[in-house]
Image: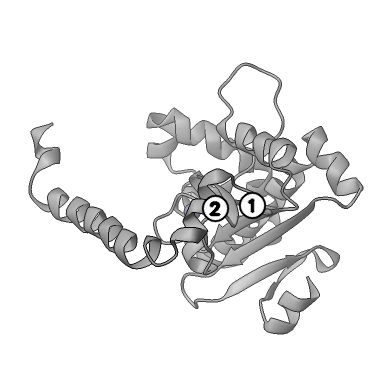
Amino acid sequence: MTGAFNGECDMSIRKLLKGFLDFKEKTYETKKDFFLKLAERQQPRVMMIACSDSRVDPAILTNSEPGEMFVVRNVANLVPPRADDDSKHGTSAALEFAVTALEVEHIVVFGHRGCGGIKALLTADPNLSAQNTFIHNWMNIADEARRRTLIIARDQPFDHQLKTLEQEAMKTSLANLLSFPWIRERVDDNSLRLHGWYYDIHDGNMYVYVPEKDGFEPLTVELADRL
Ligand SMILES: [Zn+2]
């Protein structure tokens, strides 16, 4: 336990704490009115479901400001289907709050290339499935996407299969969103729109899900204006 409080760990924690002090001095103090107004209430128009992966912070990648997005991050940016049991459904609870209380107008499933959770699912990593039931149970959400991938990308190299599964799992999550009645009814009356964004950490580009094509297109200014 004491090992957690010395050495390298101290340096990384100190960097974050000093980062906050820097933020307080340079950002908070210079935009104090903005932050005081935010302190009264939040009114984000967008909910983001992103991966816990340290490289894909949606706020940084979209140049957004505090108050713009209500964010859930979980392993592999998955949305579970609606389930009426007494398990602790953290992602579903966040969705319910964002949709029914905050009344967000958009939900974005924010996927990414090189996802460790998706890779473990694709390879049926025995360590993860046998020893870590939380991850194993969670990744079951994308089992059907895995089956689709192994058909669609059967003869492709592993890297291509991985990318395919990352994107197929996003489609599963988008479909699962519609299993919640308070999402379905808002999508049907056009007060809520669903989006899939896939960030490629290798080429630095974003790819946007286009339902009409059932595929992903590189994000350009023209595409952003069209959505
Ligand atoms: Zn990931």
Q: Quadrant of residue 197?
A: bottom right
Tag count in the figure?
A: 2
Q: Where is residue 65 in the image (x, y as percent from the top left)?
A: 52, 62
Is the residue indicated by label 2 positioned so its CB lies within 8 Å of ligand 1? Answer: no
Residue drawn at x 24%, y 53% is 17
The answer to whether the residues at label 1 and label 2 have Cβ atoms under 8 Å apart is no
Report the residue marked by disc 1.
44
- Left or right, residue 62 beside residue 116: right
Residue at (58, 20) in percent of width and height: 87
Say which of 154 and 125 sits in front.
125
* Quadrant including the N terminus: top left
Quarter of the C terminus within the rendering? bottom right
Q: Residue at image x 61%, y 37%? A: 94
- 166 or 226, which lies in front? 226
Q: Position of residue 138 (x, y in %)?
A: 54, 35
Mark found first going from the N terminus, 1 or 2:
2
Query: How is the rendered protein coloured?
Result: one colour
User: Where does label 2 land, which residue?
Assistant: 37
Tell me which amino acid carries mark 1: Pro
In the figure, residue 31 lies in which quadrant? Answer: bottom left
In the rendering, at what x and y percent does residue 38 appear? 54, 51
Residue sitting farthest toward the top: 86
